[in-house]
Amino acid sequence: DQQVKQNSPSLSVQEGRISILNCDYTNSMFDYFLWYKKYPAEGPTFLISISSIKDKNEDGRFTVFLNKSAKHLSLHIVPSQPGDSAVYFCAAPRSSGGGADGLTFGKGTHLIIQP
Amino acid sequence: NAGVTQTPKFQVLKTGQSMTLQCAQDMNHNSMYWYRQDPGMGLRLIYYSASEGTTDKGEVPNGYNVSRLNKREFSLRLESAAPSQTSVYFCASRWLSPYNEQFFGPGTRLTVL
């Protein structure tokens, strides 16, 4: 049973506009969340994270919002650039307490930035 | 720093053959992980080593074994490969302290015929 869900397999956005990637989770014990970006034939690279005690974290063009009551988080990319075209994974530690026992991932959303 | 390195990059096996995937990190990380990624799926944890000298099963450990050789190296072994193990395998590492991100290697693409 997947605890982290990304329900949109793909998303197409025009260059310069905002990209919004969504993620839902079922386990209310999750205490932090991470977003990874993956290009073809490469390993995932860490993008941004958020602790469950916050509702927003920002890093340059990337902002993650957390709505705990809805068990929902979203990644906003503004403005979207061609190099943002990649697969984005939402992830959470498998158990609370910091993540030493690994991450559980959503299935990913393929973001395509169109010129 | 090379970060997390994996060998080989590609491998083709026949059903029943064995092989070992190698992973090494030069970031002095305590914890290391093996994941697999299948088409349309996220990454799934196979095994992990929270610190040197310990290993534990993840979500999908059947058919695999691991060895934490030292702090730097963590290998994944397929004793008798099956077509269902065709996948892309990623090794990752991180510091033990809480809430740190994992750093991933470039992956090994394995095909079992």
Image (cartoon, coloured by chain):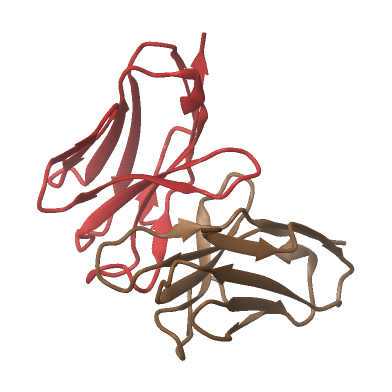
Chain colours: A red, B brown
Q: Residue furthest bottom?
A: B53
Q: A32 or A58: nearer the eye? A: A58
**Which residue is depicted at the point 58% across and 86% down?**
B69
Residue B103 position by quadrant:
bottom left
Residue A113's spot in the image, x, y percent? 49, 18
Q: Position of residue B22 (x, y in %)?
A: 67, 72
Q: Position of residue A22 (x, y in %)?
A: 33, 35
Left or right of residue B19: residue A53: left
Q: Residue at x 21, y 47 (%)?
A: A71
Q: Nearer the viewer, residue A21 or A42?
A: A42
Task: Tell which residue pokes out farthest to the top in this image.
Answer: A115
Please provide percent x and percent y for residue A96: 23, 69
Q: Nearer the viewer, residue B19 or A94?
A: B19
Where is the C terminus of chain B found, in terms of image quarters?
bottom right
Q: Is residue B62 visible from the viewing direction of this image?
A: no
Residue A56 drawn above or below residue B88: above
Residue depicted at x 48% and y 46%: A107
User: Residue sitting at 60 percent across and 46 percent down?
Assistant: A42
**Residue A73 shows in this picture:** yes
